[in-house]
Image (tube, rainbow, N blue to C red):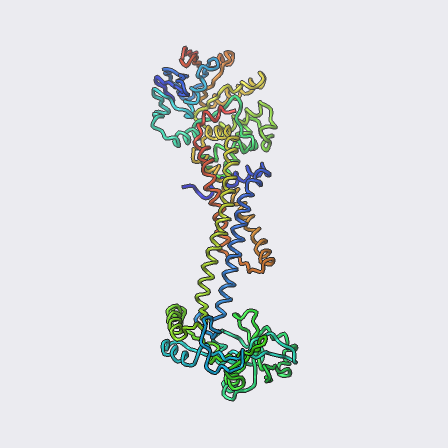
Amino acid sequence: MIAPSRIAEFMSSGARNLLRHKLRSLLTLLGVFFGVAAVITMLGIGEGAQRSVLREISGLGLRNIIAESIQPTKPVETSSSQSGRRGLRLLTFGLTHRDVRQLQSLLPQADSTITHMLAARVYLNSSRVDARAMGVLPDYFSFFHAQVIAGRGLTEADEERANRVAVVSENLAHLYHPPGSLAARPIRIGQVFYEVVGVVRQAAQGGDSRVFIPYRTARTTYGTTSIRREAGSVEFTKSELGQIILRLPSEEDVPAAASLVRRNLEMNHPQGDFRMTVPLEILSAKQRTQRILNLVLIAIAAISLVVGGIGIMNIMLAVVTERIPEIGIRRAIGATRQDILYQFLAETVTLSSIGGVLGCLCGFILVPLASRFTGWEGVITPGAVIASLAVSWLVGLVFGMAPAIRASRMDPVEALRYE
Amino acid sequence: MIRLEQVGKTYLNGTALTVLDDVTLSIASHEYVGILGPSGSGKSTLLHILGLLDRPSRGRFLYRGRDVATMSDEEASRTRGREIGFIFQSFHLIPNLTVLENVEMPLFYQGVPAAERRERARARLEQVRMSHRLTHAPSQLSGGERQRTAIARALVTQPLMLLADEPTGNLDSKTGQDILGLLDELHAEGTTIIMITHDIGIARRLPRLIRINDGRVTEEADR
């Protein structure tokens, strides 16, 4: 093996040779430079995307299984209370308390909570607010890692007494400036006013604005029937429950539990009037897509690295030819074949490593720039830096090998005679 | 020190070309030998074989008692670096390196540490009166200065034997005399020198002369 001090000497003499042909060296390392810059940028953006997907979905609670009532997609015999008037009908659909009881007995280890979705519109100071109102139990917020960021959350007492209080999601908080004015500006849902007692931050809900009121308040005030007036017809819909949310003790339990819940609900709701959301499944699906995307990006970066490597190899082959007399001289004064091999390899590796370092630095500029223009998050991990530097080094080693071997195999006598 | 027994060299480049044939000779330590012959006579090939740069196709070559055929390429290279110094007609300095770096180079391949390399190279350059040109590039030197640098490079490893291939061939006669004087001094100090020349005038000055013609040693003259 070769001593580190020797490697350093080979590298420094290689570097000096490269400095003698600055423009040529610069052009030669451009390929590796772009390759590494691409690799690190791709890794950075890929990593950032990964993290934002993870954060977004884990806000939904990775241990949760969410089932919600939806208007059935399959035709259903409308209830008998269809009135004689044309266009007036009552549609009953969705999840019921019976479902809750069944699921609780199927999954005794899971916590559960229910919500009541309100069709009534939300107003503040008689102007419409684009927000969805729902009745929730006090433990609802803990299912979604929601944080109370101002005022308070909903309590057992609110629930018990069916208080007319509301908690709004963070993206409605801007309506309350200064924050102290929460109570001063009650919110109206349908025809009923509520005192706003708090603001919650809920990572998952993204842009959706929500107004939460106690479950019992929602049930007693609005009932389970809602009326929707549409062009010339009035539609009454009735659904017992908005959502059933189950929380498993650990993520490992989720896939099995999800299929159990799905089977049970499909059996009880053949008309398909429910929708299941399993955050963990969404996460793994998104991660799968992300991985494929990452692979494609890496493949593109790899191609540019190979092109860069071929560029280096091409130039180094020319350099070897140019330096044939020098090879002869070095052999005559005692250089072994291995010495010649190391000399040229050191030069190529130095070249590609410089390209790698510059490419890395470029990545540190490109990643924040890319995330600024695309809105994606960009994260450069130490692993990505190490990987891209290692790759640049490897490119030098692999593509420098052929020229270096050619140089080392040269017959010293012929090399000395070469003009 | 050196013994050649019926050594031949044939190049196989399409057609077989015999450049050396049936050469038998011995050279002892501290000798100063001239090899005289016209161009194309095979004297350069002989010098390359003596310097372990090339190998005979036939016959036996004993270098300090060792059969060269049994040496690996690496051994031959290391031996060459340690024990043999080359001086070429066209100097063969590395153009990218300064005078000092050129002279240091053989020591680099022996693994000598940088500080000691510099020290020894300086000393040799002083010996050949080149101390005033240490950081110059070869292209900035005159022919005589280049050859003196090449001699310093050949000497820096304190070799047992100097092989000179027409060392004065590219120099004017006065500079040539200067270089020959330097070689005479080195021989006086105990270095074995083998010098190729086609100049009978130069050859005559040497204590021993080997004539070579068409790949054969035609005459060995001791004086």
Residue furthest bottom as drawn: A161
Q: Which of these two is toward me, A159 or B11?
A: A159
Give coordinates of residue A163: x percent, y percent.
54, 87
Residue occupying image coordinates x 42% and y 30%: B77
Q: Which of these two is toward me, A364 or B90?
A: A364
Where does the N terminus of chain B fall, quadrant-wise? top left
Give coordinates of residue A401: x percent, y percent.
45, 38
Where does the C terminus of chain B fall, quadrant-wise? top left
Can the viewer see residue A155?
A: no
Whether residue A122 sits left or right of residue B213 in the image: it is right
Q: Which of these two is toward me, A85 or A201?
A: A85
Q: In this picture, is A153 found above or below A382? A: below
Q: In this picture, is A129 found above or below A383? A: below
Give coordinates of residue A300: x percent, y percent.
50, 48
Give coordinates of residue A382: x percent, y percent.
50, 56
Can the viewer see residue A252?
A: yes
Total labels: the figure holds 0
Q: Which of these two is toward me, A143 or A71?
A: A71
